[in-house]
Amino acid sequence: ELKVEQNPLFLSMQEGKNYTIYCNYSTTSDRLYWYRQDPGKSLESLFVLLSNGAVKQEGRLMASLDTKARLSTLHITAAVHDLSATYFCAVFTNFGNEKLTFGTGTRLTIIP
Amino acid sequence: NAGVTQTPKFRILKIGQSMTLQCTQDMNHNYMYWYRQDPGMGLKLIYYSVGAGITDKGEVPNGYNVSRSTTEDFPLRLELAAPSQTSVYFCASKTRGDTGELFFGEGSRLTVL
């Protein structure tokens, strides 16, 4: 069974600082998604990573995928308060049918 | 663009009652999913469907049933509601294929008392 683990689970950081969220998964997959969720809201798609070495950037967020290490990272540069949210990675398995397994989530709080 | 529409948005049930959460998508997506999200937790897959007439269990299917009679609709049935089913339920859909992005509905918040 696919396991998807994120760390840290909780992260408080000051505005202007850099930090990285890690997503490890336990089985072969070359598709990984990052989502953002604000309190009481649905999930917003951030990045879709489709191959080994894929790197995507949007504003202060950059995501990468290493399929050999079964690791994805979400890097935050010069954090601002608006980035406070919960971030989820999710891994696709397509052994017969396509299923998306979510990580535990990282609750990010940006402190002024 | 309606996307994925879920109803109701909020519902309170008594223990033992039954209800159906509705999910409709207008993007002609083959794949549809039901997830639940407990407070402060990630999403767990309940059931999914790869096309009309085809459904399969996810991680936490007990206490739920689904059907997929059309491409557009994927209702989730709760039988004999229990407090453990208090959660937020998300429906999602995607196209077939490697690059298909998953689109989520707004969620249905269910409380069982």
Image (spheres, rainbow, N blue to C red):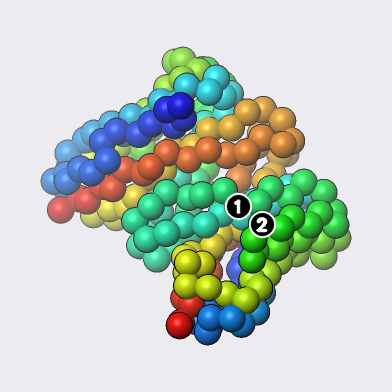
User: Residue B101: x, y in percent?
Assistant: 62, 38
User: Residue A41: x, y in percent?
Assistant: 38, 52
Depth check: A69 or B5 in front?
A: B5
Residue at x 57% of width, y 39% of height? B102
Instruction: Give the mark nearer the N terminus: 2 vs 1.
Output: 1
Q: Circle 1 — which element?
A: strand
Image disc number at residue A46: 1
Residue at x 23% of width, y 54% of height? B83
Disc 2 or disc 1, which is closer to the eye? 2
Residue at x 56% of width, y 59% of height? A88
Task: Please state the chain letter of the residue tagged with numbered disc 1 in the rendered image.
Answer: A
Image disc number at residue A58: 2
User: Residue A4: x, y in percent?
Assistant: 63, 61
Amino acid at the residue labelled 1: Leu
Q: How far separated are the C-alphas under marks 2 and 1?
A: 8 Å
Q: Circle 2 — which element?
A: strand
Judge from the rendering whether residue B40 lies leftward or rightward of residue B8; answer left or right: right
Depth check: B4 or A59 in front?
A: A59
Q: Is residue B42 visible?
A: yes
